[in-house]
Image: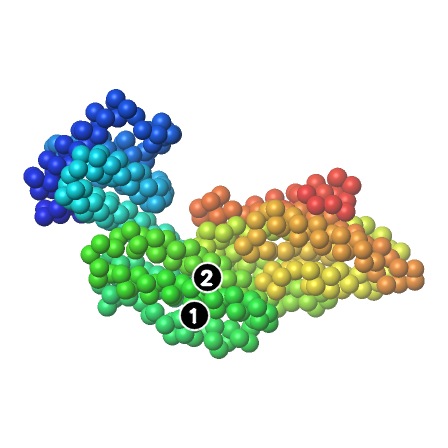
Amino acid sequence: MGQINEAGWRTTHNRQLLERLLHDLDARLRDDPPDEVLAIESTSVAWPRIKDCLLETLVSGDETRCQAMLRQLAGSDTPFMLFAHQFGTLRNLVLKQTLAAGAIDDAQRVMALFEEMEEGFAAIYLEVFLNRLGTRNHLRLSHIRVLSDKNLLSYFESHLEWMAALIDATRARLPAQMPELDPTRCQFGQWLHAEGLRLIRDRSHIEQIHQLHEAMHHVVAEVGELLPHRRASGPLYALLKKAETFSLELGNEISLLNSIVIMSVYSKDTLTGFLSRRFLDRVLANQMEIAKATESPFSVIMFDLDHFKEINDRWGHPTGDRALEHVAGIVRDTLRQSDLIFRYGGEEFLLVCPSTPQAQARLLADKLRQRIAASPLPNTPPIPLAASFGVVEVAPASYEVVDTRLVHEVVAACDGKLYAAKRSGRNCVV
């Protein structure tokens, strides 16, 4: 809040009015508690706590306790709407008793003073949120800036710099410092309307990205319109929270598109057309940085063909190669365009699935398992195929620094799951 407006509820006359009304409310509640009191659960934002805080401020003139309460609520991610609801409950109780006494003029003043106080409280929420958003955005930028191969992620980097400009403009309340508001003129927007149209094969997907990008710019344009207004902290707070959500969603989309680029430009295994294992450490390290930047988990799936040696021994290596090509086709037809596929060993494969939690990755692995089992290799007679799968989720909150040791730990964990599947009878997902 900054300081409470001298011309408003901090004047002696208005403080005395509010103090008297809150003391009257206290006395009435002791004699006849309303339903609102009986329904209150134990919560840090319950309106009786707000009432006690306001009374202390009115009596002493010291705002410290109220400001500390608001900062604690904002810092613990308590929604401002929850606070505003409880604050509104307190206001309505005061208004009810004021109107019951026939004090119409006092009721009008109470409405105006509570409105002013709510703006002050919203300003505290906004200040805390802007500070935390600035820190988060800086950390996201740091994770993108260290990437060895940015490719399309350079557009996410420019977007995060765009977000930093938005934060600075809002903090200073200066519309002239707002970032580019036209979604066709920012760096990502220019790419999306040109090269993006050629890269993304799925028309519905590109339309979805267009809508997300435009929605984010629309929200930020609303922020720019509100900046000159004196009492707009609550709406600004709500809009900026929405803008951050859109920002993370956009980061996820850019990272998925970046995976498509990786699959198209990195060198491939000649037999399967999948990425060479020598790129795995670099790609996994980058994906871990991206996960930190987008606050989104990804999953690693490792699988190999069951009893593949028997196919080679009985039918020969050319038939074994045909089996690998056959399975590669099934994998390509099953996975998303943005999933990264490596030939990890002879008959062993590793998949990196961006923005994919473990439950979703296990479903994907089982879908692959079923399709492989249902698709014998054309031969005379047909050769049945099966595969065992290990799945590991990589959650960004589980690590701080990305290094080679961490990358190898992820691969080793996935390898361990694969061997557990083998020990469980093969043709299964662990």
How many numbered callouts? 2
Q: Earlier in the sequence, mark 1 or mark 2?
A: 1
The three-letter code of the residue at mark 2 reads Leu
Left or right: 392 as drawn, with respect to 292: right
Q: Looking at the picture, how far across and down is residue 150, in whole percent? A: 47, 65
Q: Which quadrant of the structure image shows residue 62? A: top left
User: Is any atom of residue 346 visible in this view?
Assistant: yes
User: From what the image shows, is residue 275 above or below residue 6?
Assistant: below
Task: Please state which of residues 90 and 307 is positioned toward the viewer in this rendering.
Answer: 90
Residue at x 51% of width, y 46% of height: 395
The three-letter code of the residue at mark 1 reads Phe
Q: Which residue lies furthest to the top in this view?
A: 31
Q: Looking at the picture, how far across and down is residue 381, in whole percent? A: 92, 60
Left or right: 271 as drawn, with respect to 310: left
User: From what the image shows, is residue 100 above or below residue 304?
Assistant: above
Figure quadrant of the C terminus: top right
User: Is any atom of residue 66 visible in this view?
Assistant: no
Under circle 1, the secondary element is helix
Query: Which mark identifies residue 314?
Result: none
Circle 1 residues within 10 Å: few <14, some 14–19, many ≥20: many
Q: Looking at the picture, how far across and down is residue 5, in whole percent? A: 13, 47
Look at the numbered discs 1 and 2 and tell me whether their residues touch, using CB distance below 8 Å.
Answer: yes
User: From what the image shows, is residue 214 above or below residue 66?
Assistant: below
Q: Looking at the picture, how far across and down is residue 61, in whole percent? A: 11, 36
Task: Please state which of residues 235 and 304 is positioned toward the viewer in this rendering.
Answer: 235
Give the residue pinned by disc 2. 250
Residue at x 61% of width, y 46% of height: 359
Give the residue pinned by disc 1. 188
